[in-house]
């Protein structure tokens, strides 16, 4: 019997584009401002976005790209490879890091966009006896703030970010830590996510199964993800688990 449900945050509980794309656009613009004008011939807005899996012309987002899968640290590292020698050290420039944090505070906190109705299904799952946790490649503090804005932080324990000391997905340590806190064997747990990093964590931790949040099975992050396990929104998760025999049907 399944005891624990571990959720990714962005793209599952939060609308990834609605919540985070405004701040990424602002950060791209700020990064361009910090470069000498002569560098703009080789470093462009489109190249910065493309390096993290965003096509500026079409607006399409690669579900395996860094915008979908990675942390801001991963994004900075990708952008650093495009920086001309001696221009700016994105990871260690204090003013750059401070402005990035300010942009997150201004454009994300207080403006969180849920991915549909997330409150109803999550409360139903908690009331049914499942233990719920969040495992994200965002920071723990940012995750807690976002979940608190939606009024659902108290439903999850633990809430683990990429900076919580267990590494990031797809490494399994964070997921295994969540299950350790619950006292749950991996064979009695499910991971609910939307990216290859989430699926990789589920495989590496050897949990019972992976539930994918995607608008269409064609968009699942790996062919080994079962098409029957793909749902567009969390609101469909309780009924999916009921069909699979993991919780009572209504």
Image (spheres, rainbow, N blue to C red):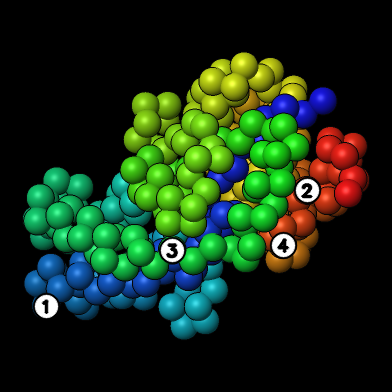
**Mark 4 sits on what residue?**
232
Residue 212 x, y percent position in the rendering: 70, 50
Q: Within 10 Å of the Cα at label 2, are there few (<14), some (14-19), or many (20+) other Cα atoms?
A: many
Dot 1 or dot 3: first in sequence order is 1
Q: How many marks?
A: 4
Alpha carbons under labels 3 and 4: distance apart: 19 Å
Up/down of 183 relative to 42, above or below:
above
Alpha carbons under labels 1 and 3: distance apart: 34 Å
Q: Are marks 1 and 3 in contact (CB under 8 Å)?
A: no
Q: Residue furthest front?
A: 127
Q: Are marks 2 and 4 in contact (CB under 8 Å)?
A: no
**Mark 3 sits on what residue?**
112
Q: Are marks 3 and 2 in contact (CB under 8 Å)?
A: no
Q: Residue at the location (77% across, 44% down)?
A: 224
Q: Within 10 Å of the Cα at label 1, are there few (<14), some (14-19), or many (20+) other Cα atoms?
A: few
Alpha carbons under labels 3 and 2: distance apart: 23 Å
Secondary structure category for the residue under label 2: helix
Q: Which mark is residue 37?
A: 1
Residue 187 x, y percent position in the rendering: 74, 22
Q: Residue at the location (49% across, 31% down)?
A: 158
**Mark 2 sits on what residue?**
238
Alpha carbons under labels 2 and 1: distance apart: 53 Å
Secondary structure category for the residue under label 4: loop
User: Which mark's residue is nearer the viewer, 1 or 3?
Assistant: 3
Q: Within 10 Å of the Cα at label 4, are there few (<14), some (14-19), or many (20+) other Cα atoms?
A: some
Q: Indicate left or right for 180 with 45 as reference.
A: right
Q: Indicate left or right for 209 with 28 as reference.
A: right
Asked whether the viewer can see residue 247, the reply is yes
Dot 1 or dot 4: first in sequence order is 1
User: Which mark's residue is nearer the viewer, 1 or 4?
Assistant: 4
Q: Residue at the location (50% across, 78% down)?
A: 59
Closer to the camera in the image, 15 or 52: 15
């Amino acid at each position: 019997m399944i005891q624990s449900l571990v959720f990714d945050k962005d793209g599952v509980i939060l609308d990834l584009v609605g919540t985070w794309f405004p701040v990424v656009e602002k950060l791209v613009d700020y990064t361009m401002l910090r470069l000498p004008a002569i560098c703009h011939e080789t470093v462009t807005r489109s190249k910065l976005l493309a390096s993290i899996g965003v096509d500026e012309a079409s607006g399409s987002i690669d579900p395996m790209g860094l915008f979908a899968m990675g942390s801001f640290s991963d994004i900075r590292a990708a952008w650093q490879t495009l920086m001309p020698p001696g221009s700016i050290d994105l990871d260690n420039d204090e003013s750059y890091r401070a402005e990035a944090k300010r942009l997150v505070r201004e454009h994300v906190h207080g403006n969180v966009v849920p991915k549909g109705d997330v409150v109803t299904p999550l409360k139903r799952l908690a009331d049914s006896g499942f233990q719920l946790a969040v495992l994200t490649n965002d920071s723990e503090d940012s995750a807690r703030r976002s979940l608190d804005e939606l009024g659902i932080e108290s439903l999850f324990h633990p809430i683990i970010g990429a900076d919580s000391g267990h590494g990031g997905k797809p490494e399994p340590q964070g997921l295994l830590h969540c299950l350790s806190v619950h006292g749950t064997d991996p064979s009695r747990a499910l991971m609910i996510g939307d990216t290859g990093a989430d699926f990789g964590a589920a495989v590496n931790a050897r949990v019972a199964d992976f539930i994918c949040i995607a608008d269409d099975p064609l968009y699942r992050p790996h062919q080994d993800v079962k098409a029957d396990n793909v749902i567009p929104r969390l609101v469909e998760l309780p009924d999916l688990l009921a069909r699979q025999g993991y919780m009572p049907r209504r």
